[in-house]
Structures are given as structure tokens and as C-alpha cells.
Amino acid sequence: MVPRSVAACQTSTWKQELAEAYRHADDLIAALGLRRDQIPDLDPEPPGFRILVPRAFAALMTPGDPHDPLLRQVLPLCTERRSVSGFVPDPVGDATADLGNGLLRKYQGRALLLATGACALHCRYCFRRHFPYSSLGPVADRTAGALSRIAADTRISEVILSGGDPLMLNDDALDALIQRLGDIPHIRRLRIHTRLPVVIPSRVTEALCDLLAAARPAVLVVIHANHPRELGLEAQTSLLRMHRAGLRILNQSVLLQGVNDRAETLQALSVRLFDCGTLPYYLHQLDPVQGASHFEVPDGHALELVETLRRELPGYLVPRLVREMAGAESKIPLVAIGSRSI
Ligand SMILES: *Cc1c(COP(=O)(O)O)cnc(C)c1O
Ligand code: SF4
């Protein structure tokens, strides 16, 4: 039997779910049966980057567990306010890579367009948590500039829609953007970096799948899940819907202390991803963004974890452990640099 709450979720639209998302820490912890004194470091009114958690995502947390790995990703803590050496507002050099209009160019052949500043979930470790999205203006106003820049540079063969989360755009806006990218002959691939299929699975409607599957250039979807429990039944249904529509789906994770820094967790995540028609792509070492130092996992431990995965899993279920470094020509595989100090 389908539980009533699931049936209700299926009939409501993703925008309603977004409107009903938790925006206050007290509401979220009360829904989980927790009290403030069980989370002594809780910061109920974080400056700048507020709490945002859709109910479908909160429903995957374990009630009564203040250390739940999904809760840890979204719960603002006072420790975020501490300034920690090396942890900075723009750890990956986005500001210098911005060609204007939110078009970031770091790597050969690829350009990344910040399609919107909005997300459906606020991840406390986000490397763009301090990005000045409001200074970018609405995507419709920027698109013309960004598109003519892309059209003028035949070396760009792939455009990555990122943000924020590009699936926060409605279907019409997304369709219009994709059509205009499709008009540029040298664009062969379009990548969509999104957490929505995980945090509001109802965003993945048949209409969206049809739109993406029919698009030219070919679309690759890269989702973001860090823990196997994020991929509940609804997320699985949505991912398999995209998979059946013929879309290729990859996942990227961030290695996070207290969330997924155990080999069993990462192993279960890879296995679960496969069951959702999705392959692991990157496992990112944390970008040292101001306010996220409590998530850091030492490189030595990260390498051990991936060694274990390599022993336990088929090669295609082992994500590539990488770090992003400002000014580098690609993401850097961790094996190659060995330690943080380089
Ligand atoms: C991560 C990133 C990409 C994509 O890199 P891949 O290694 O191709 O996944 C492209 N552009 C920017 C600005 C990025 O940060
Ligand atoms: S969904 Fe992605 S861009 Fe949005 S807050 Fe989370 S990590 Fe940042």
C-alpha cells in the first residue's frame, strides 16, 4: 500500500513543495522530534545563507537523531561563524573565471552558465554559498550576453547549466534556453548539474523528461547525492523515469565529515545509485569555503576510503576522488597531489 503522505506528494506540484519547505530550524527539528538542547551548537538565525529544506528531503531523516547525516548537511551551526584560516568566501576562483553574465570558463571545451542563483535545498558546505548571485540579475537578461559569448567561441563544445540549480527554472524558461543553445552549431553536449531530482523528486515530470530527451545538443544530467538515504523511493522513481527516457545520469558527491566519511556509506551510495540508473562520477574533497570547516575530511582518510571502494566494487561504481583548485586546468585527482599542502 502506498502511504498517504507519498500519495499526497505525488499529486502536489514541485513548486508547492518548494513553497512548503522548512525555512526555520525550529520547525525542522520539531518535525524530527528533536529539542534545541539536543543540538547545542544550533544557529537558528544564520546570517546570509538561511536554512531551506523541502519536506520530502526531511522525511528521509531519522526522527530523534540529532546526528542524522541528512540533517547535518542542512542544519546551520554556530561554528559556521568562526573564521578558520584557509576557509574563504570564494575557494575555487569563480570570480576570476567569470567572463561576465555568470558564464564561468575554467576548462578547455567547457563553459559553465549560472542559470539561476536559486536552489531547493541549502547545503551548508556549498562552495557557492557566498556567491553574489543577486548582482547577476535575472537569467533572461543575462542569457543574450552569455549566449553570444558562447556562439563566438567555437572552442566551446559543451555548456554546463549550473547555479544554483538550473531545474529551479520552469520548463518554459529551460526549454527556451536549451533551444537557443541548440542553435549554436559547435555545442555538442549540454550538461545539467542539479540536486532537484534528489531533494524534490516531483520536479522530474514526464514533461521535463520529454523536453530533455528531445533536446539537441544531447543532455547529460549530473545529480548530487552524498548519502544512500537521500535516494528514497521517490527519488528512485524520478531517476528511473529520466533513465527510461534515454538520459544519461551521473552523480557527484562531496566527502563530508559526519555524513559520508565511512567506506560502508560510500559503498552503499554507489550501489543505490546504480539501482537508480545513475553512475558515480566525482567524489569531491571539500572546497574550503568559509563556514564549512567542520565538514573537512583529511586527504589521507579520503584516499583510504577510495582504496576500500576500489577493492569492494566494480570499477564503474568507484567515483573519481578530486579536488578543485583555483586556476588549475581540470579537477585534480587526489592521488596525483597526495596532500593538502601542495
Ligand atoms: C567542474 C567544472 C566544470 C566541469 O568539469 P568536468 O571535469 O568536465 O566535470 C566545468 N567548468 C567549471 C567552471 C567547473 O567548475
Ligand atoms: S544544491 Fe548545490 S548549489 Fe545549491 S546549495 Fe546545495 S551544493 Fe550549493
Image (cartoon, rainbow, N blue to C red):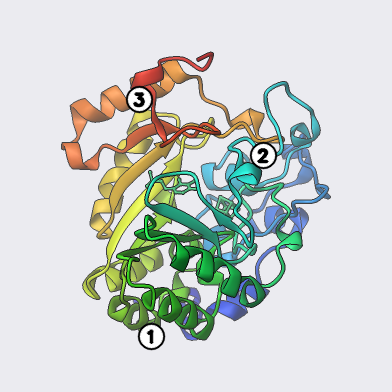
Q: Residue at x 65, y 67 (%)?
A: 21
Dot 2 and dot 1 residues touching (CB under 8 Å): no
Mark 2 vs mark 1: give the one in front.
2
**Callout 1: helix, strand or loop?**
helix
Mark 1 vs mark 3: give the one in front.
1
Q: Residue furthest left?
A: 314
Number of other residues with Cα within 10 Å of mark 1, as a class: few under 14, some 14 to 19, many 20 or more: few
Of the image marks 2 and 1, the number of the one nearer the N terminus: 2
Name which residue type carries label 3: Leu
Dot 3 and dot 2 residues touching (CB under 8 Å): no
State the residue position of label 3: 305
Mark 3 vs mark 2: give the one in front.
2
Tell me where residue 155 sits by quadrant: bottom left
Residue 124 in view here: no
State the residue position of label 1: 207
Number of other residues with Cα within 10 Å of mark 2, as a class: few under 14, some 14 to 19, many 20 or more: some
**Left or right relative to 110: residue 95:** right
**Left or right relative to 71: residue 323:** left
Could you give the CA–CA distance between mark 3 and mark 2, rounded to whole angstroms? 27 Å
Residue 142, horizontal then vertical, whole percent:
63, 70
Mark 3 sits near ligand 2, with its Cβ under 8 Å away:
no
Of the image marks 3 and 2, the number of the one nearer the N terminus: 2
